[in-house]
Amino acid sequence: MNDLAKLEGKPRCHCGVFGIYGHPEASVMTFYGLHALQHRGQEAAGIVSSEWLPEKKRFRFNIHKGNGLVTDVFRDGTVLRNMLKGKSAIGHNRYSTTGSADNKSNVQPFVVNYKGGNLALAHNGNLTNYRRLRSELQNSGTIFQSTSDSEIILHLTARSSKPTQIEQIQEALDAVEGAYSLVVLTDTALIAARDPYGFRPLCIGKLNGSFIVASETCAFDIIGAEYIRDVLPGETIVIDDDTLRSGQFHSIWAARKPEHPRHCIFEYIYFSRPDSRVFGESVDKVRRKLGKLLSEEDPITPEAEDDKVVVINVPDSSNTATLGYVRASNKRGLNVKMELGLIRNHYVGRTFIQPEQGNRELKVKTKFNTVKGVLKGRKVVVVDDSIVRGTTSKQLVKLIREAEPEEVHFRVSSPPIRFPCYYGMDFPSREELIANQCNGDVEAIGRELGVDSLAYLSLERLLEAAPSEDGRQYCTACFTGKYPIPIDSEGSKNENDA
Amino acid sequence: MNDLAKLEGKPRCHCGVFGIYGHPEASVMTFYGLHALQHRGQEAAGIVSSEWLPEKKRFRFNIHKGNGLVTDVFRDGTVLRNMLKGKSAIGHNRYSTTGSADNKSNVQPFVVNYKGGNLALAHNGNLTNYRRLRSELQNSGTIFQSTSDSEIILHLTARSSKPTQIEQIQEALDAVEGAYSLVVLTDTALIAARDPYGFRPLCIGKLNGSFIVASETCAFDIIGAEYIRDVLPGETIVIDDDTLRSGQFHSIWAARKPEHPRHCIFEYIYFSRPDSRVFGESVDKVRRKLGKLLSEEDPITPEAEDDKVVVINVPDSSNTATLGYVRASNKRGLNVKMELGLIRNHYVGRTFIQPEQGNRELKVKTKFNTVKGVLKGRKVVVVDDSIVRGTTSKQLVKLIREAEPEEVHFRVSSPPIRFPCYYGMDFPSREELIANQCNGDVEAIGRELGVDSLAYLSLERLLEAAPSEDGRQYCTACFTGKYPIPIDSEGSKNENDA
Amino acid sequence: MNDLAKLEGKPRCHCGVFGIYGHPEASVMTFYGLHALQHRGQEAAGIVSSEWLPEKKRFRFNIHKGNGLVTDVFRDGTVLRNMLKGKSAIGHNRYSTTGSADNKSNVQPFVVNYKGGNLALAHNGNLTNYRRLRSELQNSGTIFQSTSDSEIILHLTARSSKPTQIEQIQEALDAVEGAYSLVVLTDTALIAARDPYGFRPLCIGKLNGSFIVASETCAFDIIGAEYIRDVLPGETIVIDDDTLRSGQFHSIWAARKPEHPRHCIFEYIYFSRPDSRVFGESVDKVRRKLGKLLSEEDPITPEAEDDKVVVINVPDSSNTATLGYVRASNKRGLNVKMELGLIRNHYVGRTFIQPEQGNRELKVKTKFNTVKGVLKGRKVVVVDDSIVRGTTSKQLVKLIREAEPEEVHFRVSSPPIRFPCYYGMDFPSREELIANQCNGDVEAIGRELGVDSLAYLSLERLLEAAPSEDGRQYCTACFTGKYPIPIDSEGSKNENDA
Amino acid sequence: MNDLAKLEGKPRCHCGVFGIYGHPEASVMTFYGLHALQHRGQEAAGIVSSEWLPEKKRFRFNIHKGNGLVTDVFRDGTVLRNMLKGKSAIGHNRYSTTGSADNKSNVQPFVVNYKGGNLALAHNGNLTNYRRLRSELQNSGTIFQSTSDSEIILHLTARSSKPTQIEQIQEALDAVEGAYSLVVLTDTALIAARDPYGFRPLCIGKLNGSFIVASETCAFDIIGAEYIRDVLPGETIVIDDDTLRSGQFHSIWAARKPEHPRHCIFEYIYFSRPDSRVFGESVDKVRRKLGKLLSEEDPITPEAEDDKVVVINVPDSSNTATLGYVRASNKRGLNVKMELGLIRNHYVGRTFIQPEQGNRELKVKTKFNTVKGVLKGRKVVVVDDSIVRGTTSKQLVKLIREAEPEEVHFRVSSPPIRFPCYYGMDFPSREELIANQCNGDVEAIGRELGVDSLAYLSLERLLEAAPSEDGRQYCTACFTGKYPIPIDSEGSKNENDA
């Protein structure tokens, strides 16, 4: 069992969310929105629509969820038109909790019927006080259906004594801590909320008078919607019957408002699509700058400034940074060539069969192959976006060496990853991070990878690349260990994440 | 229903073939070989292995075929180890004949048991005297199970009065005309054959003493096999117990040997993977040259030589040609920038749901999105590899226009396609080809696409890019209408292709 | 969509339950127990096992549920051995709530994790104060996952402040009213409980030291277990580590203990298998007596006492009653012959395709055919167990008429059904009951069915057939409208039942 | 893996066939016909319809086949209406060749396109010169797709040089020997043929002007069709455009016409449904007579003529014979009671999980349970239709013994089975037949079964029960070893049957 991100040795993002209110084909739009957000979670998907039943004079929530890509889960497209009727819908992509006995109950959106009516919820992020809240709720008689932290929000909402659904949800959000970008569908509204630190992105768009909320703007582009603005950190917005209201719901947060937001800078480095705009800036632009700064900070040495130097990307995740790196290098007077030295096979499925004998590199070879002619005898500079465990990078280097380059140099457009993430990225344990195994000794890491030289982008330059007045508005905990929100002593991760 | 190649508006290749003899994990190797050849046919796949049953003292042919990608058909990987046992195997990827009532019977490899023993066949290409032969065979009492031209070869083999399987197959090949790159598995040998014109590629490789045959060398790379040479046009090779024999089987062909081979030049333009070597040359190298010649032949006009010019690829099919184009342009003193202006979503599945209202570009948008920042206000040069119907190109141009460039120029690294292919490419009918609709008037085509300028690579330059002494060793019928083999008067295409 | 019971025009029973504690193959035994109880619910099935994880020092509840027959849901038998490990298990058969958007969430057993640990529940019956309790729980913040009344018991248990699971469950049962025969699996025990009226059966068995609980004794026979006794009305028993404790838990019920139990007499008439023992008596014996009393009460008229009279059963539901009827008739000096005039096709699946033209009797013909030779020219007495809507009986009579009998007489071994059931049988609405449509006028019903004569068993004789001192220990509400438990004013049925 | 017939320890019939010509809902009628014939083959089913395509001015043969019951294969009922369009159709039920690597290719009807047009074939029976013909055909270049003997007929038809399809088929039938009841669909006709010995039944019916052919008349009853007559042994009938022609096609057979037909008497004993008419007689009537003669021939001994004697059937296969047995016994002055001592669970699926410990009788218990009250302390006479291996009978006796009868006597309404069948029944090998193991010593068989006495019906009486002038018109080879057609020296069974 392997998933695409794992194959690449990349951290996995928890999810992508999408919501639309007041569109005649709400679920079809949600399907395409999720399709555009597929990179944020490839292992389960679901859509919930709210349909008015005139004869019963009430709304019915229709739901379809399953494991697999969006196009797998909705392989029978008639489900969208025939079953997921209604003018409002929300959807969710996630990485699955495969192997867990109750995994299906963790697929979002979650739907419940409670005293306030219907409620569906899709959540991107991770709650840090999850264990404490779950324990408290269980002690007062609550039954949990899943092992997902997101379920907490539903129970807190249902237990709220506030009169309206929106106030109930707001009361629930006042109790949770951590990272959340939420879309919630009720009988009468689409609600979107983002935690006060704004860890995960959440954008507002509009399509012919219908408001939309999505993790990234690429979900607007696919359906021709226009980007309006981001949901602000700590903001809850309520969309109903073509109006969008904000602000008035924040009581407690006004008091505990953080000085700075803490956007996940990894969204710029790897997660988000380059054609998206997140945290108010084009990802392509930031990623290009990462490449540029990487080149400036760790310039190719003079002796390498000969014809033999070729710079190659790791398709598709480092395409943009590589372009930035090459252009900056040449601007500095070097004459390096960008080459397409690695070809990626995009038809990668879930089956991986390890041959019984030999050929240990097969796993990376199902995804990448080299163009031998452009590597042979060259000094190859590989630009990648990040290194997590290092196992994939190591195999990639081995693959490149088979094409007989003279040298292999590895450049990474982010700093060494040394700490786990508690806000919604799925890193392996600290012990598995190669940067930790080598105690941050870059040379040692380079030896482990088998490269002639290795260089990472520094934290200072990373923060320089992202739009910011003073660089303090990003969470960099995975590089620095400085966590904006203290972690629940009982541990903050879901059981399934452990 | 749509398939990937169709979504791109590209011609579809009929198939990819793979065979291996004498390897302890023959079917696992075939699985990975087919995986590397997935781009040659995405809609059905199959593997046949030959297993020695010691207690029965005979070989059993095991078979597993299905619709979908290789990784879908072999989603249950245990099939390879538990069912497809044996030391020899062949495999096939194909485009499906969806909608045909008997489509499953067309999925290859075909397996039969006849007087000579077991026989499995995988075929890439198209027979031009198919209808006449089928009619003759039917008249003499033959029953056909499929509508595939490949079945002909099996019946001719079964009806041969020659004493050995190899001679029987050879007799069958003496009777057929057209394009074929074949792998055949018998109880005692793996046979590979290529038609005298060598339309489709077929390469020989070796892995630890086991011979391999595959459509492209990328299938060798994935399993760590080494490339030996191509099967020659008109050659039949027989691999058994670690020896590879060639040559002696050609009787009739010696007489009708063509003066030149006629390799399909579209393999270089679009079909083959850039990391493959076909017809003796690296595809990457030829494709880079196509871009270079395209730039030289149709240089960007002086007024465009300003900062505003950006050159973008259509990922991933024109990546290499675009790189060649940009580099050649800059060498000529221009200062154009390559940009990643189009982002491709690789998670494209089979479901396409057309919204009831508006948004006609959705189909192309499920696959591509623009990076607006790099296109806005620019003079955009789009480099693509070919234009068939023009509908996808038109929608792509529309998508690019939404990013508000100042101008859009379209450059194509091959000549206008004006004629159908009878040798294994799946073009639409002549009437649907945009170059025909516009009578070859390039300006008219450009107006139809909505671009500010359009230019194609000339045929002369195309032939210059491909390795050749005199340019006469390629089939260019789709550009010129000059068919190397006359077409069966009854028509040469299968019913299902119509 | 049709189910077997519906095809027969019979009321449907809600479910069958099974539980076993301390057996090395607990889930395999549960599978066979459910298989024997298949007639109690054919549309969904599930098993939950409790497995001790030594390395984690806790129990894990494994669950497998699905729509269809037990043999469909567990078609992959390895699920039992590989997944449903553990020494204790419970299982449930039910009729599905097809068409309901959330039907899957209604398939039992329900499993939850709450403060007290794991809990799985399987319920046969119907709670009459369901709506009130649900409303109260929702108002205090409870979220419901299903529309099943059984879920109430879980929430009440989770909210109990009692210290032990058993006391918590008992507190929950003190709050609910209606019909319930329950099996509950906790981490440390198997609990079985039956409502104070004992509407539905629940028996205790033993297999090599492992206690078993099941709806009917036929579930013991299949696995070779021995019948011990019934769970008493109002009793809760706790089985753990080979001991079985009873009694001490009833606090409230001691006060509201009903004077008499109210066993569902329909279990004898139709629901239970004739080879089972329920309510302390062999079903075969009671059913035989029903036939006998039917004959005595409504003797065949003298003019019919000739050779022409044949008595036929409706296989298999009236087999036993017919035998009793025939034997009693002949004992009274008549000379009637039992014949197998109707042949039943047992391969009935879920597909029913109504032809567009004619042949309205096809539905009944997929299940029954006549043996023409034994009916032609005869005076046919059809013995059936009950008539609900009358539509199936009508078509059956039509089918019999096609075999050209001289006369058709219909005898029913129970009284006319005129009232809905609120305790676990799935009758149609009152308006659909043929006995209501005809205001109880038996002659009118007979005309509607198209028979020459019709007779029902009287209520007095029905009660005489069932073992009882005074006939007061049965619920006969469906015949009399006298409901032992008042019905919740809001209505007592689940939404899905409406 | 087990099938229903195997569970019962009965021989399995090869198949049931059905064909209809000129009905607007031909495939729906065929579905119901196959449903009625389900008992003749439960493991695979298929329907082929012939649809006129007005725009293409030709017929298309639509086909849907699969493993499982008819209702499983056509679970999606829309297949019948949307895909299997057309006014003519044929269908087939068969027992599968599970475990065979190429089993799917053996599912009928077979469909081919040959010089004469489309041809679909459904075959019930077994060809005795199969191996010789196959070998001859292969030697002349024929390729076989299946291991089924039925495929021979297709190739012989395709190779015929006769001008019309009907003559071609007739020529093919002139070459084959053995048992066959065939329905063949061509572009312009429905053809039915039966071998000269008439081993297997084949009946002609009519529904509103459309002719129908089916294995048994129960297939007519379900759709309201009327029985016309049987296809005669050696007859070929051609149905086209509302006419039915017969006779003129027999050239060779006129010469080799057998003196007597040789109907399979097992159709009366077990295969056919009691509500069917086969070989011109009601099965119910013959089967009743078998019971009567069994009683007369082997009367219950005087000391058994007390109240304690109960006679029980093995539901449902011996229901009719048991009724005949009881009635005859009582006519002879005995006073035995028929009881329903065995209850059969009809929800038997394909999963059988053998518990690891004990309980060896579980297999029979998934199908049968006893009604203890009617067996305890009684002298039980079990009437069954046949004994093959004896293993099931043995377990059944054990099950009955658990109910504590005083004695168990076994009566079989057919003679001991001692020889394999080469004409379409699937018996185990001779060695596995219990009657052979015990050398025909009935007492020894009885000891093996564990009964107090055992008696079989004699061959003379068996022939007396079936309608015949002189008893010579039945095949009794399985009892006597006298085979009407000599068996191919190479063996006559398909490989898959071995």
Image (tube, coloured by chain):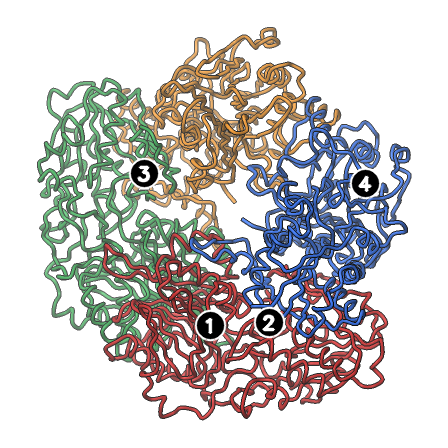
Chain colours: A orange, B green, C blue, D red
Q: Is residue C231 left or right of residue D458?
A: right
> What residue is disc 3 on?
A341
Q: Is residue A235 above or below residue B173?
A: above
Residues at marks 2 and 4 on the same chain: yes
Query: Could you tell me which quadrant the C terminus of chain C lies in?
Result: top right
Circle number at residue C195: 4
Precedes in sequence: disc 2 or disc 4: 4
Marks 4, 3: nearer the viewer: 4
Q: Chain of mark 3?
A: A
In-front residue for pair C448/A336: C448
Q: Where does the image place residue B423, in percent across and percent down from the top left?
A: 20, 55
**Dot 3: what SS?**
loop
Question: How crowded is the residue under tag 4: few (<14 C-alpha within 10 Å), some, or many (20+)?
Answer: many
Q: Is residue D49 above or below residue B285?
A: below
Q: Where does the image place residue C143, in percent across and percent down from the top left?
A: 65, 28
Q: Residue type at mark 2?
A: Gly
Q: Chain of mark 1?
A: D
Task: Give the distance between the C-alpha atoms of the residues marked 3 and 1, in whole angstroms.
Answer: 76 Å
Q: Are marks 1 and 4 in contact (CB under 8 Å)?
A: no
Inspect this view and state whether residue C277 appears.
yes
In-front residue for pair B234/B341: B341
> What residue is disc 1 on?
D227
Circle number at residue B459: none
> What residue is disc 2 on?
C377
Q: Where does the image place residue B179, in percent across and percent down from the top left?
A: 21, 59
Marks 1, 4: nearer the viewer: 1
Task: Give the distance between the C-alpha atoms of the residues marked 4 and 3, in whole angstroms.
Answer: 74 Å
Q: Is residue A272 above or below residue B22?
A: above
Question: How crowded is the residue under tag 1: few (<14 C-alpha within 10 Å), some, or many (20+)?
Answer: many
